Amino acid sequence: AVERTLSIIKPDAVAKNVIGEIYSRFEKAGLRIVAARMLHLSREQAEGFYAVHRERPFFNDLVAFMTSGPVMVQALEGEDAIAKHREVMGATNPKEAAPGTIRADFASTIDENAVHGSDGPDTAKTEIAFFFREEEICPRTR
Ligand code: CMP
């Protein structure tokens, strides 16, 4: 089925100037960008977005990293978009990411791992709504 998922290009990858290379991988995987925005997350925004991780030991470092520079946020649309996106991203820990994946090629550590992607249909919905109003999303009709 056609799905939507939320993608974030994190501050480390923005700093490496590889937004275009990462977009190119999305496009080659058949994922279409249907909404996009660059922003520098506030602490409140980062804490809110990652609220499910609030009790995890890495939470403070995660928030500090995600607010350390601008991020590029996009909604991606396509057949099986959630799984496809996770496939092109590679494992959360870049040391375990398959060769040729975004994290294998652009990330160095589990904390600074270049990209974020929704992990399922429910999180995709809430994560997209966190950044985009429905009328800001441009579904592809051709
Ligand atoms: P992300 O998919 O953005 O979701 C939460 C982030 O926390 C994750 O990517 C990692 O960058 C970071 N993180 C740091 N340590 C861990 C860990 N042990 N398990 C999962 N995520 C971690």
Image (cartoon, rainbow, N blue to C red):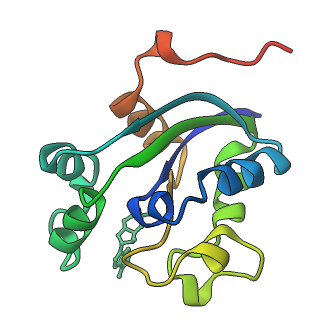
Residue at image x 18%, y 45%? 42
Out of 64 and 84, give the one closest to the viewer: 64
Quadrant of the rendering where the C terminus is positioned: top right
Counting from the top left corner in percent of width and height, residue 22 is at 66, 55
Using the image, determine if residue 95 lies above or below residue 114: below
Instruction: Using residue 115 as the reference point, say whether residue 66 is left or right of it.
Output: left
Counting from the top left corner in percent of width and height, residue 37 is at 46, 32
Residue at image x 43%, y 58%? 10
Residue at image x 79%, y 44%? 27
Instruction: Using residue 33 as the reference point, say whether residue 48 is left or right of it.
Output: left
| Location of residue 110 by image quarter | bottom left
| Location of residue 127 by image quarter | top left
Residue at the bottom extreme of this rendering? 95
Residue at the top extreme of this rendering? 135
Out of 69 and 65, give the one closest to the viewer: 69
Please give the count of numbered marks on the rendered protein: 0
Counting from the top left corner in percent of width and height, residue 60 is at 15, 70
Quadrant of the rendering where the N terminus is positioned: top right
| Location of residue 96 by image quarter | bottom right
Counting from the top left corner in percent of width and height, residue 104 is at 65, 79
Using the image, determine if residue 71 lies above or below residue 57: above
Using the image, determine if residue 28 lies above or below residue 124: below
Ligand 1's quadrant: bottom left
Out of 30 and 13, give the one closest to the viewer: 13
Residue at image x 23%, y 50%? 46
Instruction: Using residue 94 as the reference point, say whether residue 104 is left or right of it.
Output: right
